[in-house]
Protein backbone atom coordinates (compact mmCIF):
# COMPACT_ATOMS: atom_id res chain seq x y z
CA UNK A 1 0.00 0.00 0.00
CA UNK A 2 1.15 3.49 -0.78
CA UNK A 3 0.41 6.68 1.15
CA UNK A 4 -0.85 9.68 -0.82
CA UNK A 5 -0.82 13.22 0.55
CA UNK A 6 -4.00 14.76 -0.85
CA UNK A 7 -4.70 18.47 -1.27
CA UNK A 8 -8.03 19.72 -2.60
CA UNK A 9 -9.31 23.00 -3.94
CA UNK A 10 -12.37 24.65 -2.49
CA UNK A 11 -15.65 23.44 -4.00
CA UNK A 12 -16.74 26.20 -6.43
CA UNK A 13 -19.91 24.45 -7.65
CA UNK A 14 -21.49 22.85 -4.55
CA UNK A 15 -25.02 22.87 -5.98
CA UNK A 16 -24.01 21.05 -9.16
CA UNK A 17 -23.80 17.25 -9.40
CA UNK A 18 -21.51 17.44 -12.42
CA UNK A 19 -18.57 19.70 -13.20
CA UNK A 20 -15.54 19.38 -15.44
CA UNK A 21 -13.63 22.11 -13.58
CA UNK A 22 -14.23 21.84 -9.82
CA UNK A 23 -13.14 20.55 -7.41
CA UNK A 24 -9.46 19.94 -8.10
CA UNK A 25 -7.46 17.33 -6.18
CA UNK A 26 -3.72 16.68 -6.09
CA UNK A 27 -2.35 13.47 -4.60
CA UNK A 28 1.36 12.94 -4.13
CA UNK A 29 2.92 9.59 -3.20
CA UNK A 30 6.57 9.08 -2.35
CA UNK A 31 5.93 5.32 -2.12
CA UNK A 32 4.66 5.07 -5.70
CA UNK A 33 6.73 8.06 -6.86
CA UNK A 34 3.76 9.56 -8.65
CA UNK A 35 1.47 12.55 -8.60
CA UNK A 36 -2.26 12.31 -9.34
CA UNK A 37 -4.24 15.27 -10.63
CA UNK A 38 -8.03 15.03 -10.72
CA UNK A 39 -10.68 17.61 -11.38
CA UNK A 40 -14.41 17.73 -11.67
CA UNK A 41 -17.16 15.52 -10.35
CA UNK A 42 -19.88 13.31 -11.69
CA UNK A 43 -19.83 12.97 -15.47
CA UNK A 44 -17.17 15.71 -15.67
CA UNK A 45 -14.55 13.89 -13.57
CA UNK A 46 -11.18 13.53 -15.25
CA UNK A 47 -7.56 13.27 -14.33
CA UNK A 48 -4.01 12.30 -15.01
CA UNK A 49 -1.23 10.39 -13.25
CA UNK A 50 2.45 11.22 -13.70
CA UNK A 51 5.63 9.54 -12.52
CA UNK A 52 7.84 11.89 -10.52
CA UNK A 53 10.31 11.94 -13.42
CA UNK A 54 7.65 12.91 -15.97
CA UNK A 55 5.73 15.58 -14.03
CA UNK A 56 6.37 19.12 -15.31
CA UNK A 57 5.33 21.76 -12.80
CA UNK A 58 5.25 24.55 -15.37
CA UNK A 59 2.48 22.71 -17.24
CA UNK A 60 0.38 22.35 -14.07
CA UNK A 61 1.22 25.53 -12.10
CA UNK A 62 -2.35 26.89 -12.21
CA UNK A 63 -3.78 23.52 -11.11
CA UNK A 64 -1.29 23.25 -8.22
CA UNK A 65 -2.11 26.81 -7.12
CA UNK A 66 -5.83 26.00 -7.13
CA UNK A 67 -5.25 23.03 -4.82
CA UNK A 68 -2.81 24.46 -2.34
CA UNK A 69 -1.80 27.97 -3.21
CA UNK A 70 1.49 29.28 -4.43
CA UNK A 71 3.46 27.86 -1.46
CA UNK A 72 3.28 24.35 -2.97
CA UNK A 73 4.36 25.51 -6.41
CA UNK A 74 7.27 27.35 -4.80
CA UNK A 75 8.21 24.28 -2.74
CA UNK A 76 8.11 21.93 -5.73
CA UNK A 77 9.97 24.35 -8.00
CA UNK A 78 12.93 24.51 -5.59
CA UNK A 79 13.86 21.06 -6.88
CA UNK A 80 14.84 20.03 -10.38
CA UNK A 81 12.55 17.00 -10.10
CA UNK A 82 10.05 15.60 -7.62
CA UNK A 83 12.51 12.75 -7.15
CA UNK A 84 14.82 15.15 -5.29
CA UNK A 85 12.26 16.02 -2.60
CA UNK A 86 12.74 14.46 0.83
CA UNK A 87 9.40 13.12 2.11
CA UNK A 88 9.95 14.13 5.75
CA UNK A 89 10.84 17.70 4.72
CA UNK A 90 7.83 17.83 2.42
CA UNK A 91 5.45 16.68 5.18
CA UNK A 92 6.83 19.28 7.61
CA UNK A 93 6.24 22.00 5.01
CA UNK A 94 2.80 20.61 4.21
CA UNK A 95 1.81 20.69 7.88
CA UNK A 96 2.81 24.36 8.12
CA UNK A 97 0.80 25.46 5.09
CA UNK A 98 -2.22 23.31 4.36
CA UNK A 99 -5.03 21.13 5.48
CA UNK A 100 -4.65 17.77 3.77
CA UNK A 101 -5.73 14.17 3.96
CA UNK A 102 -3.80 10.97 3.55
CA UNK A 103 -5.10 8.03 1.56
CA UNK A 104 -3.80 4.50 1.26
CA UNK A 105 -3.90 2.93 -2.21
Image (cartoon, grey):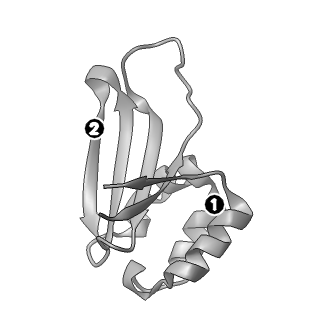
| Residue 38 sits in quarter | top left
Q: Quick check: 6 above or below 85?
A: above
Tag 2 secondary structure = strand
Badge number at residue 70: 1
Mark 2 surroundings within 10 Å by alpha-carbon count, few (fewer than 14), some (14 through 19), many (20 or more): some
Residue appearing at x 71%, y 61% in the figure = 97
Q: How many marks?
A: 2
Query: Looking at the picture, how far across and down is residue 67, in whole percent?
Result: 54, 49
Question: What whole-number distance in Å separates the C-alpha atoms at marks 2 and 1?
Answer: 23 Å
Query: Looking at the picture, how far across and down is residue 23, in whole percent?
Result: 47, 34
Badge number at residue 104: none
N-terminal-most mark, 2 or 1: 2
| Residue 43 sits in quarter | top left
In this rendering, position of residue 104 left or right of residue 72: left
Query: Looking at the picture, how far across and down is residue 27, in whole percent?
Result: 41, 56
In this rendering, position of residue 66 left or right of residue 48: right
Q: Which residue is mark 2?
A: 46
Of the 4 image quadrants, the one containing the C terminus is: bottom left
Residue appearing at x 50%, y 85% in the figure = 86
Q: Quick check: 68 above or below 95?
A: above
Q: Quick check: 64 above or below 76?
A: above
Tag 1 secondary structure = helix
Residue appearing at x 37%, y 83% in the figure = 83
Amino acid sequence: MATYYVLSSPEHTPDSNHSSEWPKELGLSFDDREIRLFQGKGHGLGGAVYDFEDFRLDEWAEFVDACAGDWLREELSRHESLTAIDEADFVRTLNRHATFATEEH
